[in-house]
Image (spheres, rainbow, N blue to C red):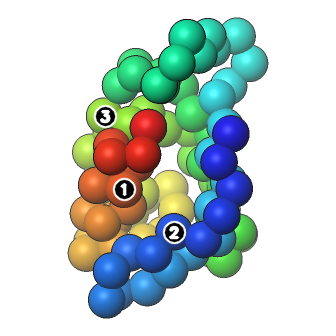
Amino acid sequence: MFAGRVNLGKYSAYDIVVFPLKGTTIPGRWDAGTDLLMLCLDQRRCCVCRPSDHPSRFVETLGLGEVEAEEMSKWLQSTF
């Protein structure tokens, strides 16, 4: 589980909580196919996502702008 502030570079920062969905195994580092639930506290929205998801997922579900979604995608891939 991750809970904390995610700095999206010069664009913005969001308070995020990310955890695996029930039944997901975590043998170590989460792989690209791990189903995660991401809560964006600042946006008051959540989404089911994977580290391999396209940035458009965060535009549609979390209401992020395109540049923020790109940065969120990069962060998710590098962190999980």
Secondary structure state at the residue bearing disc 3: loop
Q: Neighbour class for label 1 at 10 Å: few (<14), some, many (≥20)? A: some
Could you tell me the amino acid type at mark 3?
Ser
Residue at point 50%, 56% (across, down): 61
Quadrant of the drawing holding the C terminus? top left
Give the residue pinned by disc 1.
Answer: 75
Label 1 or label 3, whichever lies nearer to me, is 1
Query: Mark on residue 65?
Result: none
Going from N to C along the chain, the mark reached first, 3 or 2, is 2
Q: Residue furthest front?
A: 28
Any mark on residue 52, and which?
Answer: 3
Q: Is residue 73 left or right of residue 3?
A: left
Q: Which mark is residue 6?
A: 2
Local secondary structure at mark 1: helix
The answer to whether residue 76 of the structure is visible from this angle is yes
**CB contact under 8 Å: marks 1 and 2:** yes
* Quarter occupied by residue 19: top right
Q: Is residue 34 left or right of residue 39?
A: left
Task: Tell me which residue sits at (60%, 71%) in the image.
Answer: 5
69 over 73 or under it: above or below: below
Amino acid beneath label 2: Val
Ranked by sequence position, the earlier of labels 1 and 2 is 2
Amino acid type of the residue that numbered disc 1 sits on in the rendered structure: Trp
Q: Does 5 sit above or below residue 38?
A: below
Task: Tell me if label 3 and label 2 are in contact, CB under 8 Å.
Answer: no
Nearer to the camera, 59 or 15: 15
Q: CA distance from mark 1 to mark 2?
A: 8 Å
Mark 1 vs 3, N-terminal side: 3
